Image (cartoon, rainbow, N blue to C red):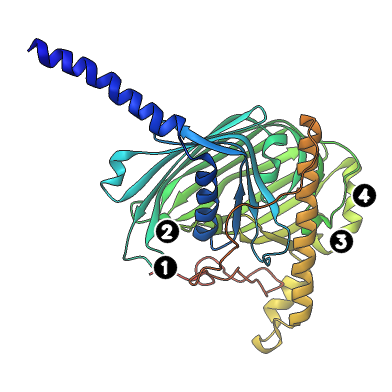
Amino acid sequence: MTRRVWLAAFCLPWFGLVYLVTWWVTFPGKAAADRVASEVSAWSGGHYLVEMAEVGPWWLGLAASNLRVFNHEGRSADEPSTLWLSAEDARVRVGLLGLFRRQFDITASMTSGASTVDSALTVKMDSARSKGWTTQRLWIEAVGASFEDLGTMLPVPVVATGSLDVKVDVAGEGGMRSAVGTVAIIGKNVVISEITAEVMQGIDLGMEVPIDVLDLELEIKDGRARFSKGEISGPLFEAQLSGDVTLRDELLRSHVRVSAVIELRGDLERIGAFLGDAKWADGKLHYTCTGYITAPSCRPDRESSRRASRAASPATSGSTSGSDATSTDDDRARRRDEARERVRKRKEEREGKGATTAIPVGDDPVPAEDDDPPPVDDDPSGEEDLGSEDMPLEE
């Protein structure tokens, strides 16, 4: 008995030493960084590229410093990417028990500036699905996250100060198409100095716009997240959001269809002169945003066009030429990229760092064979239902 105790006392430190040497001391950080970049590019079909300063072990996962994720969707290999996510420190690990059930239970923590975002994701291998997997759970929590730190991650580039409380809890045994859950976003002490979107035509507000209330809440049922609260208001404006988000297992390709009704007040009323197409008889501005959740396309919801579309025959609808549509898409992408670059530079100036040129790490993007094309909204009235029929269904 005593011999066994001594043997155990000797073996445990020995195994600890072997673990320390093989996993921590001799960890191939550069090879791991290249492999992660290659896997992300392949998994996303070349839509997202990753670069990082170094990768090291973190218990049963990885820790990366100076992580950057770039959106390369719709671009060739020699075209520049758009910075989508930036973090000084990121940690990811995979639960061992889930691997025996052919699923990946992933937990992650990301720190950008003074903000920390914690998340958990469960992906289950499913050969019955066309992509071979389903997303069964998504959980995200950030308390007091700075707008300046998270600005590049927002669908619409915004230069602002203040903080956000974010809570996302979504689960679906059969994947995101049957998911249930909630999403809540609350803003505190928010002040916007610039917002760039197609509907704003790249207008610099020329002033600080305080927001007294930023309260967004979505209820998720049967894979569709619908707004139960959608209020954003302050002394100079009031906006009400409605609509829904149709979830996909590829979460970043979830489809959004949101309507916004905005009433401008005080000094902001002068901007309304540049946005007359969206102004209805009630004096408010009406907009519709559709597309993927990472890059929605927003346009005026014209009252006259809505009435005309009801009376128009099917043969006369959708008269926009292909060249005009392509030109509009290019302009939208250019304005969005310019705005995200301004947001990135503002953050780097605040941190006292110089802007650097991104050099993506890993293999060149390879388009996915079964990747679905981006949603197209040809109806100027905004009445077409893009909820489920416009997106290819996974089998």
- Label 2 – label 4 distance at C-alpha: 43 Å
At 84% from the left and 58% from the top, the residue drawn is 201
Q: What quarter of the picture does the C terminus occupy?
A: bottom left
Mark 2 vs mark 4: give the one in front: 2
- Label 3 – label 1 distance at C-alpha: 41 Å
Per the image, label 4 sits on a secondary structure element best described as helix
* Residue for badge 3: 276
Q: Say whether marks 2 and 1 touch (CB < 8 Å).
A: yes
Earlier along the polypeptide chain: callout 3 or callout 2?
A: 2
- Label 3 – label 2 distance at C-alpha: 38 Å
* Residue for badge 4: 270
Per the image, label 1 sits on a secondary structure element best described as loop
Per the image, label 2 sits on a secondary structure element best described as helix
Q: Quadrant of residue 197?
A: bottom right
Q: Residues within 10 Å of mark 4 (few under 14, many from 20)?
A: few
At 80% from the left and 37% from the top, the residue drawn is 354
* Residue for badge 2: 177
Per the image, label 3 sits on a secondary structure element best described as helix
Up-down: is 320 above or below 385?
A: below
